[in-house]
């Protein structure tokens, strides 16, 4: 691409590909959620925006003797299916070459730098939402006192919008209905969810959205009930959530029951749960379970007497101090993640650039009036009380998720586009390492287009990443009961430092 020489020094930066290098060098986030999944698989060609994953099951076990004179009867195994959808993430701004020439020598580079930071934050936050929502799926509370009705407003829909049929050879997670109900407990009493109504939407086109199945909304029950504010509603396949001070209460548990800081006993309980369900440690992390822990939770853990005994004898040259991790304990590798979901980090907005950290965020975007800003199926405070912030520590086992990506059409050599060419520069994917941990942000492209105005000094700069993170579903597994997401666990604890 030709850049007018009169636009020096911006032209020199462009021709020498310094801008592309700036994008690559500056995209070094201190975020770790996007490093959980293995390297991404390329999205299948011509598969559309969604396809179905099949998780093959096992044959049943009968530990009795069989007659020696009778042929064995063929048995069947079940398979579990669920859908995965490709999402598109992007950001853009115009680089004004005249400003770069007359105001600041690094203006153009700084614009690309800030775009790259936006890309890092966006992708890390998107991955966080998928992991944390799955780790806490199937737990919610009533939003306000409500008289007897089948329509109950709840704080979060996460884990209540699909169900797995109880019979059949191929079981597919599909939307709840009267023909596919999800068994639940409402304040300890059995009921079913047969439909839902989401408050907010995820934009998929201009003026078009799909339901945000993680945020607040209405659960349609099979039997009418009356509830008081914050009554617990728990799905039969709810994820394993350890609450400090309460443990795991699958009858009437709720986030409001958290009554203490993170303790080492909670870590041991999660380790026992992984062993019970036969979830293996993560191979890519040297056969350790990976624990994402917030700075506040780490501070609390340091004050736990049991943890302090484990720390005795360590020096400043020992691994936890020399590397960017907390250390190895009970088969876990602990990593301090300053983008753990808290009141300080959630990207919930009530208006553009106006954060509402404890209230699920939305505002009009892409022609959708109620577009979510950070889909994540958790609450950040207990009992609607901002003085009771909650930490969510998430622990991962092996093969926890699949990640997919789709390259830019120009890189994928889509018919005709390669021949036509691109009036600009398309950066190649890349990969970086943060304290020895590979951060898979190489599935992001930077596109700098040629000038789009008559003066030839406005260069559109855009980053683009088409990604999907899918947590593996194991509900048909005979280990650990009918819990859907078994390969990651959550600990909820008080976030008061």
Image (tube, grey):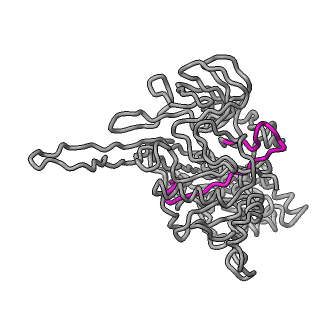
Quadrant position of residue 226? top right
Q: Is residue 12 visible to us here? A: yes
Most frequent secondary structure within the magenta stretch: strand
Looking at this rendering, what residue extends furthest in the right direction? Answer: 103
Question: Residue 164 at x, y = what percent?
Answer: 45, 35
Please give left or right for residue 88 compared with residue 164 in the image.
right
- Residue visible at 73% across and 69% down? 308
In-front residue for pair 263/9: 263
* Residue 383 inside the magenta-drawn segment: yes
* Residue 309 horizontal side relative to residue 329, left or right: right
- Looking at the picture, tell me which residue is in the foreground, 207 or 131: 131
Q: Which residues are magenta?
A: 378-403
Q: Position of residue 291 (x, y in %)?
A: 63, 61
Q: Quadrant of residue 339?
A: bottom right
Check the picture and name the quadrant holding the N terminus: bottom right
Question: Residue 325's spot in the image, x, y percent?
Answer: 68, 70
Tell me the residue at 63%/73% (across/down): 436
Residue in view at x 11 percent, y 50 percent: 68
């Amino acid at each position: 691409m030709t850049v007018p020489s009169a636009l020096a020094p911006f032209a020199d930066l462009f021709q020498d590909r310094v801008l592309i290098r700036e994008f690559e060098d500056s995209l070094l986030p201190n975020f770790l959620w996007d490093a959980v999944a293995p390297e991404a698989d390329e999205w299948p060609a011509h598969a559309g925006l969604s396809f179905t994953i099949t998780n093959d099951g096992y044959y049943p076990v009968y530990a009795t003797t069989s007659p020696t004179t009778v042929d064995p009867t063929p048995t069947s195994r079940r398979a579990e299916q669920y859908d995965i959808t490709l999402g598109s993430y992007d950001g853009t701004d115009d680089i004004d070459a005249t400003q770069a020439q007359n105001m600041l020598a690094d203006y153009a580079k700084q614009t690309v730098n800030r775009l790259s930071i936006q890309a890092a934050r966006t992708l890390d936050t998107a991955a966080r939402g998928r992991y944390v929502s799955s780790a806490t799926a199937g737990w919610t509370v009533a939003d306000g006192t409500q008289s007897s009705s089948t329509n109950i407003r709840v704080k979060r829909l996460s884990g209540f919008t699909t169900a797995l049929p109880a019979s059949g050879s191929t079981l597919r997670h599909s939307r709840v209905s009267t023909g596919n109900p999800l068994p639940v407990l409402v304040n300890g009493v059995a009921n079913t969810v047969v439909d839902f109504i989401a408050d907010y939407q995820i934009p998929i086109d201009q003026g078009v959205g799909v339901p945000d199945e993680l945020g607040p909304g209405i659960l349609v029950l099979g039997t009418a009930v009356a509830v008081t504010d914050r009554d617990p509603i728990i799905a039969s396949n709810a994820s394993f959530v350890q609450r400090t001070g309460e443990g795991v209460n699958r009858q009437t548990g709720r986030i409001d029951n958290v009554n203490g800081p993170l303790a080492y006993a909670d870590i041991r309980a999660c380790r026992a749960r992984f062993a019970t369900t036969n979830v293996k440690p993560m191979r890519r992390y040297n056969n350790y379970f990976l624990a994402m822990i917030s700075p506040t939770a780490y501070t609390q853990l340091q004050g736990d007497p049991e943890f302090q005994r484990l720390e005795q004898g360590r020096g400043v040259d020992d691994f936890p101090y020399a590397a960017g991790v907390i250390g190895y304990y009970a088969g876990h590798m602990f990593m301090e993640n300053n983008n753990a979901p808290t009141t300080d980090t959630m990207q919930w907005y009530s208006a553009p650039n106006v954060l509402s950290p404890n209230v699920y965020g939305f505002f009009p975007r892409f022609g959708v009036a109620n577009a979510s800003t950070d889909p994540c199926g958790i609450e950040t405070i207990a009992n609607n009380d901002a003085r009771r912030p909650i930490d969510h520590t998430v622990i991962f086992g092996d093969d926890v998720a699949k990640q997919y990506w789709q390259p830019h059409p120009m890189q994928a050599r889509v018919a005709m586009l390669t021949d036509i060419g691109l009036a600009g520069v398309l950066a190649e994917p890349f990969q970086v390492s943060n304290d020895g941990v590979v951060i898979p942000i190489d599935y992001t492209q930077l596109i700098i287009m040629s000038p789009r105005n008559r003066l030839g000094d406005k260069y559109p700069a855009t980053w683009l990443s088409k990604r999907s993170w899918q947590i593996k579903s194991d509900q048909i597994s005979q280990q650990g009961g009918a819990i859907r997401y078994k390969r990651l666990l959550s600990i909820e604890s008080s976030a008061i430092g």
